[in-house]
Amino acid sequence: MTNELKLNNVVSEQKTKAPKKRRSGASLDRRKARAGYFFVLPFLFGFIAIYLPMIWDSIVFSFCRVQIVPGEGQISEFVGFTNYMEALFVNPDFVKTLVTGIKELAFDIPAIILFSLFMAVLLNQKMAGRAAFRAILFVPVIISTGLMESIASQNIMDDMGEEGIEQGTETSTAAEIVSAIDIQALFAGMKVGTELVEYVATMINNIYDIVNRSGVQMLIFLAGLQSISPAIYESCSIDGATGWETFWKITFPMISPMILVNAVYTIIDSFTTDQNTVMKFIDTVYTQASGGKEISSAMSWMYFLIVILIVAAVAGIASAFVFYQKKD
Amino acid sequence: MNAQQTGAPQITKETKNKIRVEFERTPLKERLKAKFINMAFVGGVLWYIVRFVLLLGIAYIVLYPFFTQIAGSFMGRNDFVDVTVMLIPKEFSIDMYKFIILENEYFTAFGNTLLLAGSTALIQTFVCSLVAYGLAKFKFKGANLVFLAVIFTMVVPHQTIQYSMFMNFRYFDIFGIIKFLSGNATVGEIGFLNDILANINIFGAEPTSKFLQAVVEDGAFNLNNSYWPLIILSLTGLGFKNGLYVFMLRQFFMGVPNELEESAYIDGSGTGRTFLQIILPLSVPMMITVFLFAFSWQWTDDFYTTLFFTTNKTVLMPDVVDIPTSLETDYPGQNLYYSAIRNTCGLLIILPLVIMYLFCQNFLVQGIERSGLTAD
């Protein structure tokens, strides 16, 4: 009897204590949410205090015209859409460059993604010297950026090794590995269409450029390939699937989210580099004497909007085909 | 029993724990035939060869420009007009290296860039992993919005905001605080700031007194021509391609099992300590990958450095790319010669990166293999 009574007492004490404790501190979820804010705080602060004002300034700037008045310094005057009108209708080259730039983008994305996926699949297989090949193929990611790109764009040395100096002194582009005509002759009988042949030919001729620019994509694909469970491949080989079937039925669907990520990344990356045609053009406008800075920022905002639309379209279309593995 | 199956293996018990199995093996020739002469094996060997040749070819494409550049960097002046010279220099000289190092202030640029790239890369790696961890592991209101903001900073090209970025750091002031503080002050009244500013000045801003005067006159800091713009951008995760780092690290942290942190919480560790003592040591390969990217992209950067460093007081890597005065000539091979000199500058710039890469590439591959990147 006494024992039971004591037990009851203890239970009732616990019952009364428990709600008190909950009131005293925040719940785990809320505490975790607070910690989450703490972790993203540096970025959030910078984004609100530094980045958004810069973006706002830049947008406002594209609607203004700055004039230097002696004695009073710079005075900016709101001029509405004048800069945009000037970029679109007065400047003779902007629209032309824009179209070329978007065409280049349409060419680059499939080439880079196909190449990097192919290389990632190759580099994921076990073979002699895999580490060495990986190390070499990632060299451009580390080295061919910024300053080195601008040095490489002035470089005429590469021609020298292949053709000797006589031809090398002319600033011609690197020797073409294959010409479209050769391949056309090869594929004359097949009905593949000249556009496709030319596309492949330019892709092979630009292989150096493509290798240089597909480093990060290769990394992302490789990481995606590593995350596919080996058990799936094992069961495939037990069921007698060939390598080709395994690739299209297993690897490709499993890697499809990475294709989406890479497509978006490639678009962003290729339109933000300094070597981009439109960006180069905008840079030349930036240095113009009168109103160059304002017009160039109007131009880059227009270009930005177009690219955002492209990214949204690509992401929208691709996400319909992306396969997500269900997690248990 | 033996009479029933002649081909079957014979098992005899020798001792308590030992048995002896005797069976007829198929002859060696047959076995080799079965192993090597079939479609799977031949196909495998062919694929192996094709793959190897293909990779070798692509590795060659990557490395070939470096071969020509290295070859060109050791050539003398006359080699550039000599038709018979191909890759191997006839007139061996190290003049290019000598004059670039002596006249283009290579070592000054090296030291300055090392300080700049090292500090920004360290800060960026840490800040990005903080933000990425917050986004990957905590559910809070607006987390998706923050992630969208990260992607937004990645999408806006830096050229678009270059002018406002320049102006922002030319007249640096957060929410007008400095303008408010220094509104009616004269240089004498805020002299106590001198000590603080003297300490800040290690990053090469203008001499303190002048700097202070400018602050009072403009009502804002002029941070250009110092390392501060880049450090502030790094501290807030807005540096070059920081969105990509946050994305990569977020995917990595999402792959880290939750049980690990839960057990740490149960043992009484707070979120900060869990992050520092459990998550960070776990993600060293990935963080080295990010550091490598951040360091080398800052090292060869010519956008931010030329934007913020308008005077030539701080010599950085972009200033090295120049034709040394001792090598200026005028002769038929001039274009090629100058091109070779610029390439040599490039080689000197990437040399430290290559050395660092050789040490870190192992981590790079490890970082990928453990990341278990998934896009959901």
Image: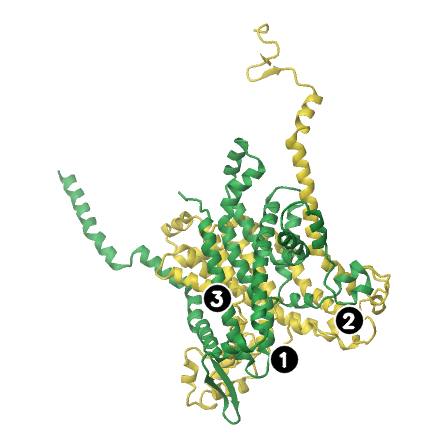
Number of residues whose C-alpha sits closer than 10 Å to that of mark 3, classed few (under 14), some (14–19) or many (20 or more): many
Amino acid type, mark 2:
Asn
Q: Is residue B237 visible?
A: no
- Image quarter where the N terminus of chain A lies is top left
| A5, B154: nearer the viewer | B154
Give the drawing colour for chain B.
yellow
- Which subunit holds the residue at mark 3? B
Residue that numbered label 2 is attached to:
B335
Q: Are marks 3 and 1 on the same chain?
A: yes
Q: Who comes first in sequence, dot 3 or dot 2?
A: 3
Position of A5 compared to A120: left or right? left
Residue that numbered label 1 is attached to:
B313
What residue is drawn where x is 51% and y is 60%?
B244
In the displayed structure, B209 sits above or below B250; it is: below
| Residue at the bottom extreme of this rendering | A71
**Mark 2 or 1: the one toward you:** 2
Image spot of residue A54 (x, y percent): 47, 74
Position of B51 compared to A50: left or right? right
Image spot of residue B274 (x, y percent): 42, 55
What residue is drawn where x is 54% and y is 46%?
A225
